[in-house]
């Protein structure tokens, strides 16, 4: 999940990073969210694999999802998620005036994106401008957290894949 100067960090960003590092939830490969061509109010989720709530999810075909119609007055942030059953969906946010005024997408505090549902990982955040008739690539922000390194590298201290030494305690510490 790339960050750029001026981007606001959300609760979803923190949760997805924490879940990747402590639970092993995240994307192994693929599952990139892209606009349709020509752009409309649909998006594609590419093929790929992820671990979600201790379950390996494999998507072997591109999935099309429809973005809910835009509010005529205010923008909103939607999120694209994958749950442990392998279902891809869009969770619509609540339209609200942009803050700071004049900024868009991840460069705004408001509107806030909806929370990530239980047993799900976030793949992307979609900026839905007021009155939008189409979603372009500039309005889709990649929120995938890669866990590929966790699957191939184990901690030299703990011997546990994807978990740092500080997250694992000995039997003596647990008593």
Image: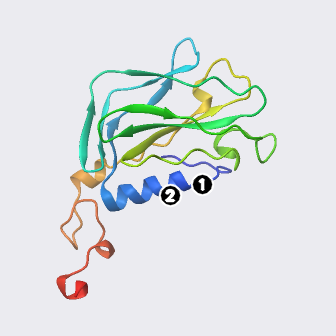
Lateral position of residue 137 relative to residue 1, left or right: right
Crowding near pointer 2: few (<14 within 10 Å), some, many (20+)? few
- Where residue 60 appears, as percent x and y from the top left, is 27, 24
- Where residue 144 appears, as percent x and y from the top left, is 43, 42
Lateral position of residue 46 relative to residue 174, left or right: right
Residue 133 drawn above or below residue 149: above
Image label count = 2
* Nearer the observer, 25 or 150: 25
Residue displayed at 61% across by 39% down: 93
Residue displayed at 70% across by 37% down: 95
Mark 2 highlights which residue? Answer: 14
Residue 159 drawn above or below residue 82: below
* Mark nearer the N terminus (2 vs 1): 1
Q: Quadrant of the C terminus?
A: bottom left
Residue farthest top in this picture: 38
Residue displayed at 59% across by 15% down: 40
Crowding near pointer 1: few (<14 within 10 Å), some, many (20+)? few
* Nearer the observer, 22 or 5: 22
Q: What kind of element bears circle 1?
A: loop
Residue displayed at 24% across by 83% down: 174
Q: What kind of element bears circle 2?
A: helix
Q: Residue 148, labelled with which disc? A: none
- Where residue 101 appears, as percent x and y from the top left, is 81, 43
Q: Residue 9, labelled with which disc? A: 1
Q: Mark 2 near mark 1, Cβ–Cβ under 8 Å?
A: yes
* Nearer the observer, 158 or 96: 96
Lateral position of residue 125 relative to residue 95, left or right: left
- Where residue 69 appears, as percent x and y from the top left, is 63, 23
């Amino acid at each position: 999940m790339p960050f750029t100067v001026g981007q606001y960090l959300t609760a979803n960003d923190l949760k997805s990073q924490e879940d990747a590092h402590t639970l092993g939830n995240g994307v192994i490969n693929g599952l990139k969210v892209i606009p349709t061509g020509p752009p409309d109010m649909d998006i594609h989720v590419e093929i790929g694999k992820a671990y979600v709530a201790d379950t390996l999810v494999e998507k072997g075909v591109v999935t099309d999802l429809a973005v809910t119609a835009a509010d005529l007055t205010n923008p909103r942030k939607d999120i694209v998620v994958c749950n442990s059953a392998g279902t891809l969906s869009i969770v619509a946010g609540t339209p609200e005036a942009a803050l700071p005024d004049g900024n868009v997408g991840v460069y705004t505090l408001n509107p806030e994106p909806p929370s990530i549902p239980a047993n799900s990982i976030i793949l992307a955040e979609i900026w839905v401008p007021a009155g939008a008739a189409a979603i372009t690539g500039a309005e889709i922000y990649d929120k995938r957290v890669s866990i590929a390194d966790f699957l191939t590298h184990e901690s030299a201290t703990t011997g546990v894949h994807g978990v740092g030494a500080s997250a694992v305690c000995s039997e003596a510490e647990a008593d």
